[in-house]
Image (tube, coloured by chain):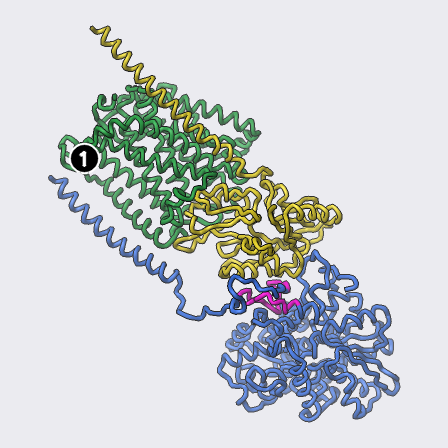
Amino acid sequence: MQNQADKEKERQVTRRGFLKMMGGIGLTGITATIAGCSTDPAGGKGWMPQQYQVASSFPVQVKGRIPIDPTNPSITRDDKKCVLCGQCVEVCQRVQTVYGYYELPIKDDITCVNCGQCTLWCPTAAITERDDIDKVVQALEDKSIHVVVQTAPATRVGLGEEFGMAPGSFVEGKQVAALKKLGFDAVFDTNFSADLTIFEEGTELIKRVTGALDEPLPQFTSCSPGWVKFCEYYYPDLLHHMSTCKSPQQMLGALVKTYYAKEKGISPDKIFSVSIMPCTAKKFEAARPEMNSAGKHAGKPELRDVDVVLTTRELARLIKSKGIDLTSLKDEKYDTLMGESTSAGLIFGATGGVMEAAIRSAYFLITKQEPPEALLNLTPIRGLQGCKEATVNIPGVGDVKVAVVHGLSNARPILEAVRKGDAPYHFIEFMCCPGGCISGGGQPRTSLPPSDEVRQARINSIYNADAHIYAKRKSHENKEVLALYEKFLESPNSHIAHELLHTHYEDRSKHLTVKKNA
Amino acid sequence: MSKGVLVDLTKCVGCGSCTVACKLYNGNAWDETTPTLGDKAKLTGKNWTVVHHKEVKDSNGQPVWRFVKQQCLHCKEPACVSACFAKAFQKTEAGPVIYYPHLCVGCRYCMVACPFNVPKYEWEKAFPLVTKCMMCSDKVEKGEAPACVSVCPADVFKFGEREELLKEAKAIIAKDAKYVKHIYGEEEVGGTDWIYISDVPFDQLGFKTNVTKRSLPSYTASFMHATPFVGITWGVILTGLYHYTKRRNQVSKENNKNIKA
Amino acid sequence: MASHAQAQKWSFRITPIRVLLLLLSAVAIGAIIFRLVTGLGTVTNLSDEWPWGLWIGFDVLCGVALAGGGYGTALIVHVLHKDYFHPIARSAMLTSLLGYLLVMAGLFLDIGQWFNFWRPFVSWGHHSVLFEVFWCVSCYTTVQVLEFGEIATERVGKQFHSIFKKALPVLMIVGIIFPTLHQSSLGALYLLMVDKLYPLWWSPIIFLFFLMSSFFVGPAMICVETTLAGKAYDHWIPIPILRKLVRISGYAMILYLIIKIVDLTNRGVLGLAFSGTFEANWFLIEMIFGIIIPIVIAFTGFSNSRSGLFTFGLLVSCGVVLNRMNVVVTGMIRSTGVSYVPSLWEFVVSAGLVAMGVLAYCFIVENFKILEHDNHSHAA
């Protein structure tokens, strides 16, 4: 009966081992089943776009949506929030004339001018800017990196809305204070480089008018990257009309890593350049391969002129995430060297502003006299009418005919006219977004779709500051710009100015088949 | 007459509206790991339709992007239906191949049988079911287009009687030189209710082009029909043999006895 | 010593190997419960690309094929009344019964809605080959249990013994029809995969290959089994009996080989076998080691020794296993595009099922008249 004892022993061993194992497996199994293998805490899973739908009854008003390339640097879409309402199609096709203006089949690109207007129309905020906040936070936390920021003209009349203030609230000083509190090492004003743009672009215009530059008239403004890409896609034959000037954002970016770096004795690769923009297309613009002039100048072509672009909405989120209450901040001033600005730079943010600023200074550059009061309030080219024109008499030149267009659907007729040679203008301002940058795709979301009321409030705020808050109203009075020319750039359109402040464009028509007679 | 959908791949802009409509209509969760649109798009238990992004060359050798919507093709004679031993898959009069979860045993023969690898499984679940596009069969019953078809902003789809769509597709590819002269789904596995036309050869777009033109159930039909007869005949033969050999053994035993005696 | 000599005592010897088998079974049962509770995704490496894996391939397809020894032996002994082979009949049929029970267990584990396993009994997908397999396997297993009833009632429930004995011939005939049908329909399952299964294995007559191989693997399994049982219980089946069986098997294999070559040639894919591809090499291994070498053994003097018979049995059995795995895995890799390696737990469960089968076999052999029994009790 030796076997009997062995059997008993074996049985015990296996039974114990078996029970142990079963316990382990059972526990794991039950945990895994009950918890669905998830270790997430409760809550936070309730965002249901279905709230717009009724189960089993397919809505009749669905219209689909625009295509968005997953690698689009400006905008992204959260499929979970999309309800296929078709508002993005509406704005992209009807307001911006991008979607639906190319033949199918497509070529090797999802045609998008990165304007981000769809982010303002999307009722569920499924379409948003590509969030780059983390990159900025990372740079701010790295003590070895010198983080420089610039703020566009239009953000100061939009940012307040994110903090409960009325549309158009003017928060320039508070914005600067918030940025300093966030830890930016230098806060500069894109108004400064807008003033600089006037020097460069005005000089270019004069050269075109006088024939010193063998490029056609009318000259097109080039500060709206959405507009620039639109022209590259649909009117590549007119790119010679485009001013070679970079946008103010890119000019300041190029100067931060050259002029500022030199003045402060900081190595350009230790500088991280951020810009706060009302615009999603600025993210695309900053990422254009050729936007590395400062890097090339320093022999480090991998450096970007502008490292990260944050929209107004992202800045608001960043400020909120750090527990800063914008409304209670004391106004602060921009840092010197590239912080001074005139209101000519400021009005770049509203439709017609670039043109008005240009005329103010062109008058001075040509006549060496200050422009008359009427030219400081050039009302015919202000406001929300889609296409505006004006004729300005400049002594010595004669009548200068200008036009102002905002919203890309308004650009098409005038571009067709230019194509046919029927456009009698010398200079045309194009702004991609309706109302100009104050209603850019990166500005705070408002009523849906964005209303002219809000646009007008922001525009009024800008012109109010132009008339009443800013001390100087003409770009050529900007002392820091003059100092910049004196110390670094020599003169407008100089060789180094061309190297850092001017750019070239790309014919993108090979990436789509433009619809004829669209 | 069964309903079908004609898909013109040249018109797709890759917006993915169809994939969203599918999710919304069928109440399917979004798959965090597998997108419904782009290079990594994949049919899964949650993704009943996806739009693949393909970088290919057009007829001029120029690089172009094409988007290919994938879902169940709703074969005229579906392998999954023929494979299912519990009638969980059924082909409706109107065309859609539909699935009844309560009948499913979970054997996954449908998945192995499907020539296009469409049915997917809810692997993460304790009691998983097979999933695939139902062609919004309740909408189709009412004569409405499936959800994905109804939301397309680019006019990629045409919903209607399959045979008429086939005629229309033939007319389109005959008239317009850019199309390849093939209608995918016209003859593949005996014909599918979703048919595709394209300007880029289908094999470059991820379509399985080397499939048989015979309906798959026809491969097993004759086998299945023969089964009862084989069974009965075999039974008769065996019974006969049983009695014959038994008798023979007895006879030989008796003979042996006789010899001994 | 435990043996059926001690008539009424249940006995089960414990040896180190059996402890190992018990442990393996225990681990497998744990894994099985875990799988039944949590689903297939957590335990197996199955995926949308590989809906069928080791469990279907080994537990079911191979299990059914290897358990095919039962019906072949039944055919030879009970229908053709070749009493010469009587000594192996009971053990062959026991192996078969256990094999089928394990197949049922394997199938049960592999289906996702396991509580719904009975559905095809009421919801008839009669156009499905699997429907036929399902019914045949269910019925055949029932028949086999009843067949075993004749043996079991020799010891328990003796009063029913005469009923079972009378019913046996009918059960035997039914018990041959069913396997004939489902062995072939297991192959016919793959008729649908004409565009997926590699042409070396897919064939319009794949069901015939499955049927034939399940027939000739029977004697091979008996050779393996009797060698093992012989060692364990010192009960040796005479070599001539086994050799005769092996010869029957050998003839079937020659026929199989001829039909295979004709089929491949007819479809114009014979060349693929020598193309040096992954599939071709596995196919050649299957044919050479599983068919050709065993044929040589069967018809030469090598089969006149225990080691020769054992080698034959092992090669043919492994050849059939390889054939089934080639159909389920190797032949599908190309069309699937991704590879499949079973998870540890899939192996554990498969091995555990086999272990349980071996243990059950040992228990039954030690407690019922399986190896040595009265020839005349079956003669009726």
Q: Quadrant of residue C151?
A: top left
Q: Quadrant of the C terminus of chain C?
A: top left
Tell which subunit mark 1 falls on.
C
Is A85 one of the magenta-colored residues? yes
**Chain that appears green:** C
Position of residue A316 measured from the top left corner of the image (x, y, whole percent): 55, 80
Q: Is residue B77 above or below residue C227?
A: below
Going 84% across and 72% down the picture, which residue do you hit?
A216
Magenta stretch: give its range: A66-89
Q: Is residue B180 above or below residue C153?
A: below
Tell me: A508 left or right of A323: right
Q: Is residue A361 above or below residue C300?
A: below
Please name whichever residue, C347 or B118, is drawn nearer the observer in this view of the structure: B118
Q: Is residue C39 visible?
A: yes
Position of residue A142 measured from the top left corner of the image (x, y, whole percent): 51, 76
Tell me: C130 left or right of A222: left
Position of residue A260 measured from the top left corner of the image (x, y, whole percent): 64, 81
Q: Main secondary structure of the magenta part?
A: loop
Is A230 one of the magenta-colored residues? no
Few, some or many residues within 10 Å of mark 1 (<14, 14–19, 20+): few
Please name whichever residue, B244 or A232, is drawn nearer the observer in this view of the structure: B244
Q: Quadrant of residue B231?
A: top left
Tell me: A46 left or right of C70: right
Q: Secondary structure at mark 1?
A: loop
Q: Quadrant of the N terminus of chain C?
A: top left
Q: Which residue is mark 1?
A: C156
Q: Colour of chain A?
A: blue
Q: Colour of chain B?
A: yellow
Going 16% across and 37% down the picture, which residue do you hit?
C10
Please name whichever residue, B177 or A63, is drawn nearer the observer in this view of the structure: A63
Amino acid on which disc 1 is placed: Val
